[in-house]
């Protein structure tokens, strides 16, 4: 099964983990799944609040 990846530098989609144009690492373009059993969500929320990403 192939996954689609996104290069934030070139703004291109690819099936490779490295961008064929610039050679940088690609990322998954969709957000991670939400789980109500996530044990670490409170820490991520705390860090986002400290950085001012969320209020």
Image (cartoon, rainbow, N blue to C red):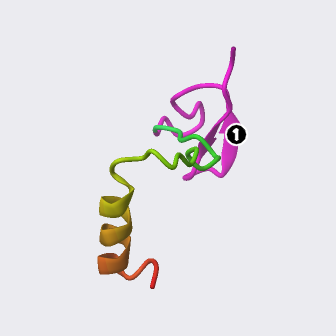
User: Residue 8 location in percent, x, y?
Assistant: 56, 52
From the image, give the main secondary structure of the stretch colored magenta.
Answer: loop
Query: In screen coordinates, is 27 left or right of 48?
Result: right
Q: Dot 1: few (<14), some (14–19), or many (≥20) neighbours within 10 Å? A: some
Quadrant the C terminus occupies: bottom left
User: Residue 2 location in percent, x, y?
Assistant: 68, 19
Query: In screen coordinates, is 37 left or right of 14?
Result: left
Q: Quadrant of residue 44?
A: bottom left
When the figure is inspected, residue 38 is found, relative to residue 15, above or below; the finding is below
Look at the image and say whether residue 4 sits in the magenta stretch.
Answer: yes
- Between 15 and 20, the one lying in front of the other is 15
User: Residue 20 location in percent, x, y?
Assistant: 59, 30
When the figure is inspected, residue 47 is found, relative to residue 33, above or below; the finding is below
Residue topped by disc 1: 13
Look at the image and say whether residue 54 sits in the magenta stretch.
Answer: no
Q: Quadrant of residue 14?
A: top right
- Between 21 and 37, the one lying in front of the other is 37
User: Residue 26 location in percent, x, y?
Assistant: 53, 39
Q: Which residues are magenta?
A: 1-24
The residue at 63%/46% (across/down) is 29
Tell how many labels. Answer: 1
The residue at 33%/51% (across/down) is 40
């Amino acid at each position: 099964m192939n996954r689609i990846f996104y290069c934030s530098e070139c703004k291109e989609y690819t099936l490779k983990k490295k961008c064929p144009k610039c050679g940088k690492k690609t990322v998954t373009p969709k957000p991670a799944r939400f789980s109500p059993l996530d044990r670490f969500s409170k820490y991520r929320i705390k860090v986002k609040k400290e950085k001012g990403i969320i209020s």
